Amino acid sequence: MIETDGPNQIQRDNTRRRIVVLANTDGSDMAGIVAEIRRLVTEARFPSGYSTTLEGTFQAQEDASRLIALLSILSLAAIFIVLYSRYRSAVLSLIIMSNIPLALIGSVVALWIAGQPLSVATMIGFITLAGISARNGILKISHYINLVLHEGESFGRTMIVRGSLERVTPVLMTALSAGLALLPLVIGTDVPGKEILHPVAIVIFGGLITSTLLDTILTPVLFLQYGAKPLERLADSQAEFKSAHAY
């Protein structure tokens, strides 16, 4: 018999002996560290009867990330349904939702500049940004439709230019108001209490910049290219509605 040092308490899980190894990170990317641990564990050769499981904070983060990914899909679907119920056109709904990828560009760049990793907080920011970024498209598309159906404008480049110029101020003011409101959360990263709000603010702030700037070109171009037929259908349905209520 050989005497050696051992744990002062034997832990068991489901009738099997269990040894817990605890560790904390130094602030580095937890996802990268966990991926490296999993790689090393996979390459290791354990004796027969031994197995390993990785648990802890990162496991809860992974579960939350999967849930948020599912909720993101549901959110996008809900946004599309709301837009379709308003405009009765999948084309117009997709034109409005094209702002979402534009916003994601700015969010990713902002996270890279701020040195923030992808986390649950940033994913929440992405979901919030999806709804905010669709606002610019709604403002412009609704105004284009109003110019044609109610102000006698003909569909074409002249109408698009007029509608875009008339919506520059509302779009910039709403984006500026949201950006200024987020500014206290963007700066002062070391202030206690901002650990969760700061990444969310970074995502939304960066997305607002790119979606506002790039949408100035993208939405008018897409509407000029693909908006004629949906607009014609809206005009026909409005005419039918008026004729039905005229009697």
Image (cartoon, helix red, strand yellow):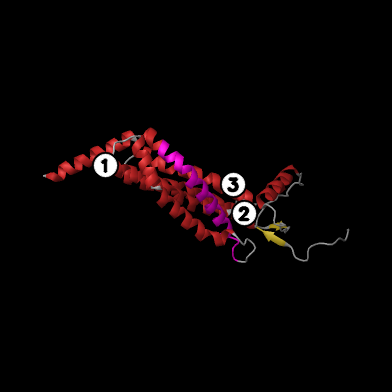
- Is 2 within the magenta? no
Q: Residue at x 43, y 43 (%)?
A: 97
Q: Residues within 10 Å of mark 3 (few under 14, many from 20)?
A: some
Eyeballing the image, is 118 above or below 181? above
Q: Quadrant of the C terminus?
A: top left
Judged left or right of residue 204, residue 47 is right
Q: Which residues are magenta?
A: 193-221
Q: Earlier in the sequence, mark 3 or mark 2?
A: 2
Look at the numbered disc 2 and give the secondary structure of its residue: helix
Q: Quadrant of residue 223?
A: top left
Q: Give the labeled residue for mark 3.
A: 109
Q: Position of residue 112 (x, y in %)?
A: 63, 48
Q: Earlier in the sequence, mark 3 or mark 1?
A: 3
At label 3, which amino acid type do we have?
Val
Q: Are marks 3 and 1 in contact (CB under 8 Å)?
A: no
Q: Give the labeled residue for mark 2.
A: 59
Look at the numbered disc 1 and give the secondary structure of its residue: helix
Q: Residue at x 30, y 37 (%)?
A: 231
Q: Residue at x 63, y 54 (%)?
A: 58
Q: Give the labeled residue for mark 1.
A: 149
Q: Spot the residue most to the right.
A: 2
